[in-house]
Amino acid sequence: MAPRSKRAASKPVSKPATSKPATSKPATSKPAVSRAPASGPAPANAATEPNPNDPLATYRKKRDFARTPEPSGAAPTGTPQQGARRFVVQRHRARRLHYDFRLEIDGVLASWAVPKGPTLDAGVRRAAFHVEDHPLDYFDFEGIIPSGEYGGGDVIVWDVGTWEPDEAGDPPDPGAAVAAGELHLDMHGDKLRGRFVLVRTRTDAAGKEEWLLLHKHDDFSAAGWN
Ligand code: MN
């Protein structure tokens, strides 16, 4: 049988181009054009202007895509889907090891950094920090973020699968559940299975949200699982 997981295969590493950027720019570069106040009709290129409601604006702002191999999220966000949605957990050996827990919600990957990682042990609550939404094409990202860049360190896919919100409503609205600070979900991964709960416990003055990730007692919970 052929190996099913591409995670097991070592990827050929393509060397970055070694050409250096020009060391000096011409002094005659165009001065910044000041935009006229928006009094006339909307310009035809309005779609290319930064959108303050873009859920990926923070993601892009934190990263220099000339330096990090991470996806830029330039592709349009996916369409919101109902029923089974994808999830990924990536192990990220940044300055501090953590696991990035990402759920497909409303066309992006809603994301939490979990320092100790998720567990099936229903007796354990794991701290989780809500971080910026990531683009859907982060789903299978693995690679090395150069040191000095945001999140510098290596990333591997630790688990993937699908999940379903356990929410009332037709259709259920897990985005609203996250905004309200409590999401119950059923996970169908290779490692992570069964009923999990994410609950917000604290939002600090800077807006950083502390959450807890826990597994409910069910057929998949396993005491001592790590
Ligand atoms: Mn991370």
Image (cartoon, rainbow, N blue to C red):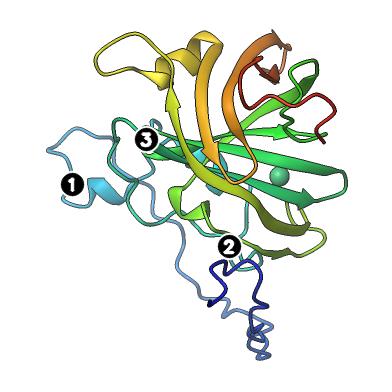
- Label 3 element class: loop
- Point out residue 46 in the picture as x, y percentages from the top left corner: 24, 46
Say whether marks 3 and 2 touch (CB < 8 Å): no
Q: Amino acid at mark 1?
A: Pro
Residue at 64% in and 76% down:
9
The quarter of the picture showing ligand 1: top right
Q: How far across and how far down the image is residue 159, in percent?
A: 62, 48
Which residue is identified by label 2?
Answer: 65
Assign the C terminus to one quadrant of the image: top right
Q: Label 1's element? A: loop
Please identify the residue farthest to the left as the structure is shown. 41
Nearer the observer, 17 or 134: 134
Residue at 79% x, 41% y: name it: 98
**Disc 3 target residue:** 84
Using the image, tell me which numbered label, if any, was put on residue 43.
1
Vertical side of 180 occupied by 165: above or below? below
Residue at 50% x, 22% y is 185
Residue 210 seen by the camera: no
Q: Position of residue 180 (x, y in %)?
A: 50, 9
Residue 145 visible: yes
Residue 36: give x, y in percent of width and height. Answer: 29, 42
